[in-house]
């Protein structure tokens, strides 16, 4: 079946991106598409007047406030007149063959095609396929690699919303991008739903766009981006796993989010003085500690938001269940790297592996991949695990001894922890054992 660019509506979302539009819009005007739609998110930089003055042929839709990426994209798709909708970020420019190359990969079974995204110069890869960690954290494959170094898979789990083409009727039938996501991972969720509904997503390597590199997101504070990442990962798995796996993965996701929050906070649970090191580093205005505490709160706020949205998310699960044509087992191979480490913390990873074995995801994913991830950690990190385990065992014994033999008024226990902080664990243990021996 012959398809033409004249059947395509191109939608781009803009927020204070007039400078980006000066590069994007000229590249779209030569593609021969049916229409170009700019959905503006309440810009205050003159973007709207720029479009009206210089590109009167472009359809301009206006939100009064910044509504993120999902809602404006849906608005543009609903207003579009083309049979197909192509989405492109405002901080990109399109290759002359962008649309035509994508159209050749479409079929009734493949209504969605992802473009290959390169850096602005066209030398390095920004998107060349997709990977999904089992907790919902997405990854763009081959990011940063030289173009000549990469290959590609024809079928992928999800497209990048920054440059993709989809049959408009299918997009609207599936509900489009989930507006609850605001931004980040809404394309992951859409791709997963496409596969659930019996469709497929393809990568078109000849369909190329050039990206300036998350220029819109980089104008936002990093903690906002990380908050959306944590929250939307939770929403993605809450919506799309089958019931059996949903009941296994969701409690594990909540538990591990809490663990990441505690570990980010700097709290040392093996110490009687939980916050002493954190407090000291904050008083010293340690920027790393401040960032860690913010990320700790991000996990908690993301978890709270996701649980607050649970009633609405469960209704979406019901709708997805009605569309389901494929099982999790049929989709799992598309995850690519389900046990990719999302934190480089050997203690956390070891505990995560133990929990994974407990909940039994072996019927869905190969758990040996998770064990292999732990084994590939640098040897010094594995040694850190063993050292911390031995220290915790020693502390359990010392805690018992402290209860049996309360410290003298001068507080030997306080001296013990002071020695640990200043002279190391072994010196502190030796001194406390010497004291306990004399007290017998």
Image (cartoon, rainbow, N blue to C red):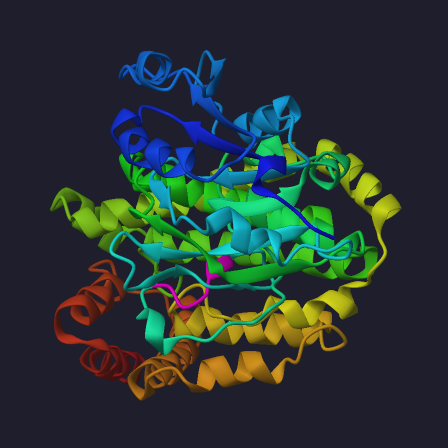
- Tell me the quadrant of the picture where the C terminus can be found: bottom left
Q: Is 132 above or below relative to 46?
A: below
The picture quadrant where one finds residue 24 is: top left
Q: Is 198 above or below relative to 63?
A: below
Q: Of 33 and 217, which appears nearest the observer?
A: 33
Residue occupying the point 50% across, 72% down: 152
Left/right placement of residue 312 relative to residue 80 reads right
Range of the magenta residues? 138-143
How many numbered discs? 0
Q: Of 76 and 382, which appears nearest the observer?
A: 76
Quick check: is 415 in the magenta stretch?
A: no
Residue occupying the point 50% across, 70% down: 340
Q: Is 18 above or below relative to 386?
A: above
* Outermost residue, right side: 322
The picture quadrant where one finds residue 264 is: bottom left
Residue occupying the point 39% across, 80% down: 385
The reply to whether residue 97 is visible in this rendering is yes
Give the image location of residue 314, x and y in percent.
Answer: 77, 39
Quick check: is 141 in the magenta stretch?
A: yes
Give the image location of residue 418, x and y in percent.
Answer: 18, 64
Q: Of 386 and 98, which appears nearest the observer?
A: 98
Give the image location of residue 6, x and y in percent.
Answer: 59, 36
Left/right placement of residue 138 relative to residue 168 reads left
Q: Of 19 and 81, which appears nearest the observer?
A: 81
Residue occupying the point 56% across, 61% down: 203
Give the image location of residue 163, x and y in percent.
Answer: 48, 47
Left/right placement of residue 97 relative to residue 366 reads left
The reply to whether residue 66 is visible in this rendering is no
């Amino acid at each position: 079946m012959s398809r033409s660019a004249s059947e395509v509506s191109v939608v781009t979302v803009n927020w204070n991106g007039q400078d980006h539009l000066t590069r994007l819009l000229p590249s779209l005007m030569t593609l021969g598409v049916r229409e170009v739609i700019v959905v503006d998110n309440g810009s205050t930089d003159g973007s709207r007047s720029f479009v009206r003055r210089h590109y009167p042929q472009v359809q301009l839709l206006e939100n009064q406030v910044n509504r993120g990426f999902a809602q404006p994209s849906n608005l543009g798709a609903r207003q579009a007149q083309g049979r197909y909708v192509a989405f492109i970020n405002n901080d990109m420019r399109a290759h002359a063959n962008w649309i035509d190359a994508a159209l050749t990969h479409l079929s009734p079974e493949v209504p969605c095609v992802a473009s290959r995204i390169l850096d602005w110069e066209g030398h390095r890869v920004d998107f060349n396929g997709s990977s999904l960690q089992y907790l919902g954290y997405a990854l763009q494959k081959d990011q940063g690699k030289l173009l000549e170094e990469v290959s590609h898979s024809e079928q992928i789990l999800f497209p990048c919303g920054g440059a993709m083409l989809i049959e408009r009727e299918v997009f609207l039938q599936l509900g489009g991008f989930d507006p609850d996501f605001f931004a980040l991972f809404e394309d992951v969720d859409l791709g997963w739903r496409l596969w659930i509904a019996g469709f497929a997503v393809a990568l078109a390597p000849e369909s190329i766009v050039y990206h300036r590199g998350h220029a819109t997101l980089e104008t936002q504070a990093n903690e906002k981006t990380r908050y959306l990442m944590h929250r939307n990962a939770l929403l993605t798995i809450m919506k799309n796993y089958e019931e059996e796996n949903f009941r296994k993965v969701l409690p594990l996701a909540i538990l591990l989010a809490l663990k990441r929050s505690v570990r980010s906070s700097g709290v040392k649970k093996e110490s009687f003085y939980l916050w002493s090191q954190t407090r000291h580093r904050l008083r010293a205005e340690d920027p790393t500690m401040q960032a860690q505490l913010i990320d700790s709160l991000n996990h908690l706020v993301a978890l709270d938001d996701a649980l607050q949205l649970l009633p609405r998310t469960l209704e979406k699960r019901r709708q997805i269940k009605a569309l389901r044509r494929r099982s999790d087992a049929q989709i799992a191979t598309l995850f690519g790297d389900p046990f990719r480490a999302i934190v480089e913390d050997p203690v956390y990873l070891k505990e995560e592996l133990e929990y994974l074995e407990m909940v039994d995801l072996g019927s869905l994913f190969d758990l040996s991949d998770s064990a292999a991830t732990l084994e590939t950690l640098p040897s010094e990190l594995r040694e850190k695990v063993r050292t911390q385990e031995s220290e915790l065992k020693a502390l359990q014994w010392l805690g018992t001894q402290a209860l049996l033999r309360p410290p003298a008024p001068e507080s030997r226990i306080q001296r013990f922890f002071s020695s640990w902080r200043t002279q190391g664990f072994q010196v502190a243990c030796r001194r406390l054992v010497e004291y306990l021996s004399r007290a017998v």
